[in-house]
Structures are given as structure tokens and as C-alpha cells.
Amino acid sequence: MTPPDPFTSDERRAILTLGSLYSFRMLGLFMVLPVLGIYAVDLPGATPETLGVALGAYGLTQAALQLPLGWLSDRIGRRPVVIGGLLLFILGSVIAASAETIYGIIAGRFVQGGGAIAAALAALAADYTRDSQRTKAMAIVGASVGLSFVLAIVLGPEIAARFGLGAVFSLTACLGLVGLFIVLVALPAVPVAPADTVRGDWEVSHVFGGGLPVLYASVFLLHGLMMATFLIAPKALTDGLQVPADQHSVLYLGTVVLSLPPALLIMRWGRRVADPRAPIIAAILPFIAGVLLTIHSPSFWFVVAGFVLLFTGINALEALLPATVSRLAPGARRGTAMGFFATSQFLGIFVGGAAGGIVLGAGGATGVVFLVIACCLLWLALIGIRPLVIPMTTPLATVGVASKIDKSGE
């Protein structure tokens, strides 16, 4: 075992600042998930299909732009890309807040998605840290996304119940302004220069090699299934189980709190192993069980258990998956690799929302259950087939073990 290597003061400041930026941005996005399917159903043009598109529209433009903007951030720098993306995000939030039809919300969500900065932010977090600290830094950033999800899933229903759906989008715009202030004022000006700049064939192999496509598929399925779940579950709570919409936040808060200890245990396990497949599978299994219970459950207490399992998987995977990508794809083109990862993530948001709406309209909740089961079986098969091999250039101190790494997938 290698003794723990702490962050330097510059690394600590940079990661805490970036974590805050992630949190404010994702908080606004996640707040829409538990409320759109309830409060937008009475808008002109609202159908299961258009509601699904409204939920997933953000992901389509995000998916289209993550890779080119991740690539661009490797060329012109991360900060200009992040600033431009935040401005588009704020504009889209204002459009959605003022919308009077479902099509206005769809348009706002498309513009929001033009602020495709997730890849640039993830690469920036890696740029600020040494090789030995990168996994820990990415885990902290990933955990900030999980924290945003926790807060959003509680705040969204409360704000929508008191002030309406437009207030959720207005608050999202305000949070985007806070993020812009963080970038302009609080973010350190000059990141640590990467020590592992390698070009040519190395670059290509670390964007597509070492099991990275499995992680791209995993984040696609994670967010696709999340969208399908939150298209159905909130309305099922209201109509099927007679839980008033203004009480959903209490349910979410309680189940999120119960989910945190097992999620943290899985995240800690993921930091300490050389092959992260086992902790990833340990996070996928409760997520799958939670999805199935929340969208098709016979009683309130089964739904409670489902949300605990669902949030356990979401919080663990939101930290594990990007941290694993950062371990498999070091170097000056990390922005490109994170671009593929973020593209897959946001494409999953669009496909999950749109496909969930289509299947819901055609076959009801039962049809969505069968779709979820098929996707989950595919997901587990993908994880089991391909080893996730950490490059030998990454110090074993970052994964907490001194065991020999299997080189068969390099």
C-alpha cells in the first residue's frame, strides 16, 4: 500500500470550485425531472410523446455538441468554451420559463442543451490535478453531480408546487448566472500543465481502447433509463398511489438519505480496486431494481424501496463512471475522451425521454417495463464481456492497491 497523497492547496481550490460549478449547473437541470410529467400535462400540445421529447430535448443538442466542444477545448482552452456554454444554458432557461405551450418548453430545452460543457469541465478538472490525484478529483466532481441530483429531486417538486413550472426554469437561469460568476471570478486562472502529454496512436487508443466504449454505453443506458423512469414515476405516484404532488419532495428526501450510506460504500470500493467492473455492477443492480419498482409497483412501500435502490445506483454511478474514464484516458486529449463520454450521456437523456414517451403512449407502463428489462440485460452483458484495464502509467496509489494489473486488454 502506498501512503495517501493529499491534494495541494491549488488542486483543492480548483476541484472545490469546479465541483460548485457542476452542482449549480446540474441542480437546475435535475429539478425538471420530477415535475415536468406532472405540471406540463395541461399545456397546449402536451401528449406522452411531446412530454418525452421535452424531457429529453436537452440531451439531443448536448449529445451533438459535446464531442466538438470537447475537441475545441483541447485547442483554444477550456474557459472560453465553458463561458459560451453557460450563456446558451441561461438563454434556454429563460425561453423555457416564459413558454406557454409544450413546444416553447421543447425549444428552450434544445437551446439549454447548446451549452454542452460537460466534457470541457471534466477535462478541466483533470488538467488541474496531478496524475496521482486524478481519480479522487473526478470522484469528488462526480459526487457533486450526485449531490445536485439529491437536492434537485427534493427542491423541484417543492418549487413547482408553490410557484409553478416556470419558476423552476427561472431558478435554473439564476443558477446558470451563479455558475458564470464562478468561472469568471473564482476559478484559478492557470491550471497545472499535464505531465502526460502524448500524441499519435496513444491518443486514439485511449479514446476507444481499454474498455472505454463500455463506459460510454453505460452512461448512455444510465441516463436513458433515468429519463424513462421520471417520465412515469411522478405521475404514477400522484394518480395511482394518491400521493399529492406537493408531498413528493418529502418522499424523495427520505429515500435519498437512506440511499447515501450504501452509495458511499460502493464509491469507496470503486476507488480501491484495479478493475472497477465489480463496484460498477454493484451499483447497476440496485439501480435496475429501483427502476422496475418505481415505474410498476403495487404499493406505496414498494415504491419507497424502489426509490432507495434507484438513488443508491444513481449516486454511485454518477461518481464511478466519470472517474473510471479519467483513469483509462489520461493525456492531453482527455477532453476528446470525455467528449465521447458526455455525448453518450446526453444522447441517453434524449433517447430515454423520447423512446419512453413513445412506448408509454403505445403500450403504457407495462411496455416501458419490458423496454427497461431488455436494456438492463444488455447493460450487464456489456460490463461482463470487456475488462476495464487501467493503464500501467497510472500509479497504483490512485486505486489504492498494489496488485498486478491484467494487461490483456491493453
Image (cartoon, rainbow, N blue to C red):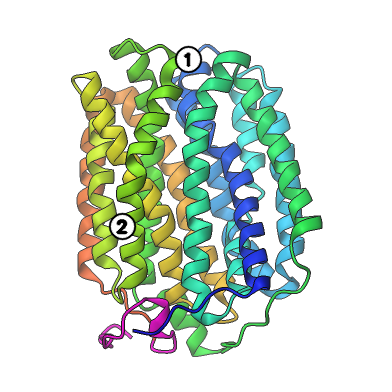
Q: Quick one: SS at disc 2? A: helix
The one nearer the camera, 79 or 190, is 190
Q: Which residues are magenta?
A: 392-410
Q: Is residue 86 left or right of residue 184?
A: left
Give, as a three-letter code, the residue at label 2.
Ile
Q: Position of residue 194 (x, y in %)?
A: 62, 83
Residue for point 56% across, 87% down: 196
Q: Is residue 254 left or right of residue 135?
A: left
What residue does disc 1 label? Answer: 246
Quarter location, residue 404: bottom left
Residue for point 43% across, 26% down: 49
Residue for point 70% across, 42% down: 176
Give the vertical position of 374 relative to 189 (above or below). above
**As drawn, which residue projects farthest toward the front?**
3
In the rendered view of the protein, which quadrant contains the N terminus?
bottom left
Say the numbered circle drawn on residue 370: none
**Quick one: label 1, few (<14), some, or many (20+) residues within 10 Å?**
some
Q: Position of residue 310 (x, y in %)?
A: 31, 40
In the rendered view of the protein, which quadrant contains the C terminus?
bottom left
Q: CA distance from mark 1 to mark 2?
A: 32 Å
Q: Is residue 347 magenta?
A: no
Answer with mark 1 or mark 2, whichever residue precedes in sequence: 1
